[in-house]
Amino acid sequence: MAAIRPRDLLSDALLERLGGTWREGRGDAGGARGAGLPENWLAGVSGWAAGMPPASRDVAATLHRDIAKLGDAGYLNVALPPEFGGLGCTLRQAACGQRRLARHAPLTALAVSAHLYWTGAAADAYRTGDDSVRWILLEAARGALFAAGHGAAGGDLRFADPRSRCEPAGESGYRFSSPAVLSSLTPAWDWVAVHAVHSGGSARPDRSGAPDAPDAPGRSGAPGRPDAVLAFAGRGSRCTPAFRVARVQPVGTPGDVFTTSALAWGHSILASVQYSDARRAFNVAVAATASAAAPGGAGGAGHPLDQWPVAEAGLRLDAMKAKIAEITHPWPLVPWPAPDLGGQRLISIFTMRQEVADGARQVLSLTARIADAPAVAAL
């Protein structure tokens, strides 16, 4: 029997029951301009919290219902290895599943992206024999939902903003105070990833919260040198302990499978959502223009869909999809001790993410021209 893929779990019937679609400010049924994600989400290179509408409580409630439906279908565990009850899917499969989900419910796709990439990164680390983040797989297997605390605009392009600071807090681990690392689009999360820079290296808690522990994950061993701290804060009675330090590493290129995989999974999944939303807006605009345009155009101008914005947008969408494939298709299930850490692979991940963000903005701009084409042709 053929292996189940993430997108196989997203049946048409399930997708039709999801409500995580941006609706505010559309103004019409077609919604060519308002289709999918808010414009300022794209303008901020996927600033997660920046695009929340005034009726955020209603949006959060809708996303909560959508996430529960996806959980019931088994979609949230696709990245877990089979021994944890998951599908053991590849990054390529997860990205394809997110593209399908984003075409129908882009906000819901955003809301579950962090859960997929943290569990995907933890699975990569686990397969190399690194048990330091095995607890993430165990928590996800029992239904815990993971979120990412980088809701400020542009926060998904880095793990630790140099302006975000944290300080050691004794047995509690670290204290994070910057709003940039304390916001998330995922509602009702059980664990949220927080990250910031610690300027001193003399007190580095391990995952149990004990300062100066010799087995701290990713411990740099260089007192006084700035460190990037990645930790998970939990809430509710299920999260014990409620704070876990995952990595403490020197600021700069990551040097372990978990952090590198989180970058690859995170940027690829977010880029896939952004690509799919741009494709969705383009398809809506083309369909609306085709039905509204007069046969033969006006004044010899030709049919609006024969004009350059359509071809230009199509070419940019194809380039975005190909760029994502460069990262997702070869990314392994880590059969060897580690993937190519840092170096050209890391540069390629960030380049892909930026090119997709830029391409999505350009496609939406072209989509607006396509939507206006029938009115212009009728003049």
Image (spheres, rainbow, N blue to C red):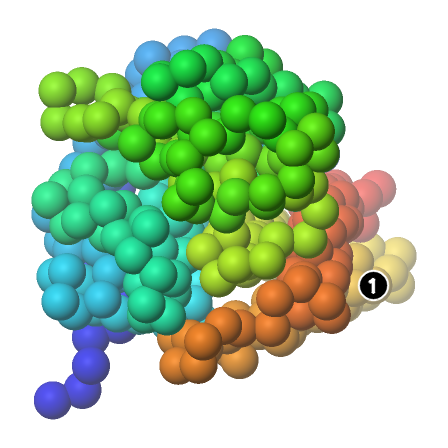
- Pick the front one: 338 or 146: 338
Query: Where is residue 343 shown, x and y percent of the image?
Result: 72, 67
- The answer to whether residue 200 is seen in the rendering is yes
Q: Residue at x 65, y 33 (%)?
A: 223
Secondary structure type for disc 1: helix
Locate residue 167: give its quadrant: top right
Q: Is residue 41 left or right of residue 193?
A: right
In this rendering, the count of numbered labels is 1
Q: Is residue 38 visible to the viewer in this orientation of the structure? A: no
In depth, the one of 240 and 106 nearer the eye is 240
Q: Position of residue 202 (x, y in %)?
A: 59, 26
**303 left or right of 136 in image:** right
Along the line of sight, which residue is nearer the eye, 39 or 377?
39
Residue 183 location in percent, x, y?
A: 48, 21
Q: Which amino acid is tagged 1?
A: Trp
In the rendered image, the quadrant that contains the C terminus is: top right
Q: Which residue is mark 1?
A: 308
Question: Looking at the rendering, which quadrant does residue 205 occupy?
Answer: top left
Residue 364 vertical position relative to residue 162 in the rendered view, above or below: below
Q: Residues within 10 Å of mark 1 (few under 14, many from 20)?
A: few
Name which quarter of the figure residue 25 lies in: top right
Q: Residue at x 71, y 34 (%)?
A: 225
Image coordinates of residue 185 in percent, x first then y, are 43, 28
Q: What residue do we see at 40% from left, 45% from top?
A: 215
Q: Quadrant of the N terminus?
A: bottom left
Does residue 38 appear to the left or right of 24 in the view shown? Answer: right
